[in-house]
Image (cartoon, grey):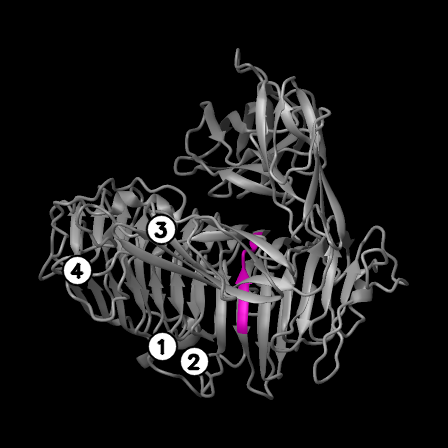
Amino acid sequence: MLCCVVVSLACATTYYVDSVAGNDNNGGTSSGSPWQNLTKVSTITFAAGDQILLKCGSVWNGQQLYPKGSGSSGSPIVINSYSTGAKPLINGQGAFQEAVLLSNQQYWELNNLEVTNWAATAGIYQGIHIRNTDAGTLNHLYLQNLNIHDVNGAMSTGLDKGKGNGGILIEVTGTATPSKFNDILVQGCNIHDLSRTCIKFFSSWGSFCTNPTVVLSTNVVMRNNTVTNYAGDGICAHFSTGAITEYNVSSGGCTNLDLANVPIWFWDNQNSVIQYNEAYGTVQTRDGMAWDVDGCTSGSVLQYNYSHDNAGGFVMFVCSPDCAAKNYSYVRLPFCSNNIARYNISQRDSTRVLRFSGKINDNYVYNNTMYIGAGTAKTVDSGKCGSTGPTKQGPVNTYMYNNIIYNTEASGAAYTFVGTNYVWDYNVFYGNHPAGEPSDAHKLTSDPLLVNPGSGGTGRLTVDGYKLQSGSPAKDSGMTISGNGGLDYWGNPVPSGSGPDRGANEYVSGGGSPPVTNFTGNPTSGQAPLTVAFTDTSSGSPTSWSWTFGDGGTSTAQNPSHVYAAGTYTVALTATNAYGSNTNTKTNYITASSGGIPPTADFTGYPTSGVPPLAVAFSDASTGSPTSWSWTFGDGGTSTAQNPSHTYNAAGSYTVALTATNQYGSNTNTKTGYINVGSGGNYSCTSLTIEVGTLVSGSHSDTHVSDDVRIVINAVKSGKYSVDNAYTFETGLGSISSLTVTNESQYSNLGSTGYQYRYVDVWNYTTNGWVQIANPRISTAGADVTTVTTVSSPSVYRSSTGQVKVRFRHGHVNGTAWTLSEDYVKITATP
């Protein structure tokens, strides 16, 4: 226990909780005498600077974490993990509305937890709920490195038409005292497999449509989060001013086909930014756009984002009927104004690329590059919303400048305009020219000479194909726009020549661009002294680096390490190449907690598999600043070096252990079967589960000699995901360096206009959840359809005993009866 001498003579205490070895009668103030249950934690009122450490590998089923008390400025209360292994799991099981709750509390930080809250029947549920009820301003609430999944929130029941159900709800409610949040950070979280929303802000005080005394939350940051396989909305930093939503990734979202949802969007925001995000694979078309500026949002910017393969489209500006249609006693007009979408890239977004709807005024879309692929119904779709009278009208004053519309759609992709004064100027319309293409006083219809249009992959930095070639007519021919942000998608200054270019790229003489700076730190939180290894992940081949670590320390190394004392620190990296510099600043990125504890031992080895003689380089990745190391390599070899190398001369599976020691003690990390020397092959599954409760034993893989070995499933249910086939494979491998899933199947009863939904998932043993790796739509009936999918980062898909689990989810787009014949399922794995 570390006591701090301050005016109040308060004493900061560290508490430990272990679901296996703990006892609620213990003192709880050391790892040797921890508490056991979260119910115990929830009875305690904690003080500024206290820490609550949950042991890794612990699981609390049917319990809620609801600690009491508040921290203070500079001394937050911190919840974190300790020891090694899986993140501590809080599994609410629907016994509470929320698995984790903070109510009218401030100065809290929640780090490195896993949270679920699945009930048998969907209802009003959240993983984490942070609530402000008539409490005025609540400050400093940080959620970092959390794994939140499997929350069975109802689609339409509860707060804001069910949108408050999901992973994280940050809610301002009450009617007595105008209230808000200040200094909110949600960073590095993995949120997946939800039946409604991932991250939701709500405020009963924040509606610009209905509230004459608007109170908006401030200093809200949503950064580096991943949201995957969710039915409703993704990241919604609503009712905020100056909010920043950046470096997030959404995939496979908005899978519910009945209600309108969007991956990342604003509602009632002022002067906020959505930037450096990626959204792809959005399923539905109501709305299904990657980005949305909605509900009285003004002065906000969408920039430097990449959207691709979204069923609903690229971006929309909309005044919701919730604002325009109702007869409120107070209504602010105009509803949605002075918003900007600039320097974004859209690739193969479907249905409609741009959408403008309702009473929106003075919005700007400029310097975007939009690659339109097959299946797009409309390039621009606009309409009215509201009831009758003056509120039922379309957009007014919509400005479209310097965009490149690269249209490969042979039919459709029309333009429809409702409202008044759409201004198009200096745009490029290349390829097909569908009905309604607007006039443009400075239109270009010649090839803009993009490097390789349509070649973008998964990841914001895979889109160099949308840069301009040196002879492009889009160079230096655009319209000068005041206050354009100063940078293009790649970080090039605008303009770089005699005038601005058209599209998302500002061509740099010589073909080069400044770097796009990014970096990671590991770990980002822990006990002081905290050693953090920083890794430069910038694109654009930087040649020099300048780091500031937030505590006065600096470095010019590419991948430096830095030791932190207790505190919270902002880190910045400036990367430079021959074409310029770019800076990335991550606010409050590193948190080092006070007090001394033994190190947490960890390490990596590379490679972890191969043939003998196999030379493996081991690297110490321990936290807590160890001063000595002791290695055993599983074949009799040992070392006391920090980062040793070892050669394995015989085939086998080897267990490696590292004991790390500092002045406070030692900790050992043992990785069983970590190094594997041998060969791999093809594997057949040992069991198959069809839907729930029906088990078919035996092999479900074939060498494809014939098509006679089949499992025929006549669907008794209809609709998407109506049948799940889950296969288990026994590989016996101690590690996996490559993994391929092969499946052949045949579908019947598709109908003349229908198609089959087919999703391929692999079980992630690190996050304990299914991960979607492919989502083909099958429109061929009565013939074999083969899918071969290579799995990225395969090591996380192997259990400790060598199992691999694969799941196929099937359904029909029209919800009609259908038949599936599985021919064979096979995996190919190598160690």
Q: Residue 664 colored magenta?
A: no
Q: Residues within 10 Å of mark 1 (few under 14, many from 20)?
A: many
Q: Residue at x 14, y 57 (%)?
A: 497
User: Closer to the N terminus: mark 3 or mark 2?
Assistant: 2
Q: Which residue is mark 2?
A: 208
Please state, as top left, top right, bottom left or bottom right, where the C terminus lies in the image: top right
Residue 637 vertical position relative to residue 270 in the rendered view, above or below? above
Q: Is residue 164 visible?
A: no
Which residue range is magenta in the image?
183-191
Please name the amino acid that badge 4 sits on. Answer: Pro
Q: Residues within 10 Å of mark 4 (few under 14, many from 20)?
A: many
Report the Cα–Cα distance between label 2 and label 1. Answer: 8 Å
Q: Secondary structure at mark 3?
A: strand
Please name the amino acid that badge 1 sits on. Answer: Phe
Q: Which residue is mark 1?
A: 335
Q: Nearer the viewer, residue 331 or 559?
A: 559
Q: Is residue 727 left or right of residue 95?
A: left
The mark closer to the camera, 4 or 1, is 4
Q: Residue 190 colored magenta?
A: yes
Q: Which residue is mark 4?
A: 500
Q: Which residue is mark 3?
A: 544
User: Closer to the N terminus: mark 4 or mark 1?
Assistant: 1
User: Closer to the N terminus: mark 1 or mark 3?
Assistant: 1
Q: Are marks 3 and 4 in contact (CB under 8 Å)?
A: no
Report the Cα–Cα distance between label 1 and label 3. Answer: 47 Å
Q: Secondary structure at mark 2?
A: loop
Q: Residues within 10 Å of mark 3 (few under 14, many from 20)?
A: some
Q: Nearer the viewer, residue 555 or 520?
A: 555
User: Closer to the N terminus: mark 2 or mark 1?
Assistant: 2
Q: Quadrant of residue 754?
A: top left
Q: Quadrant of residue 42?
A: bottom right
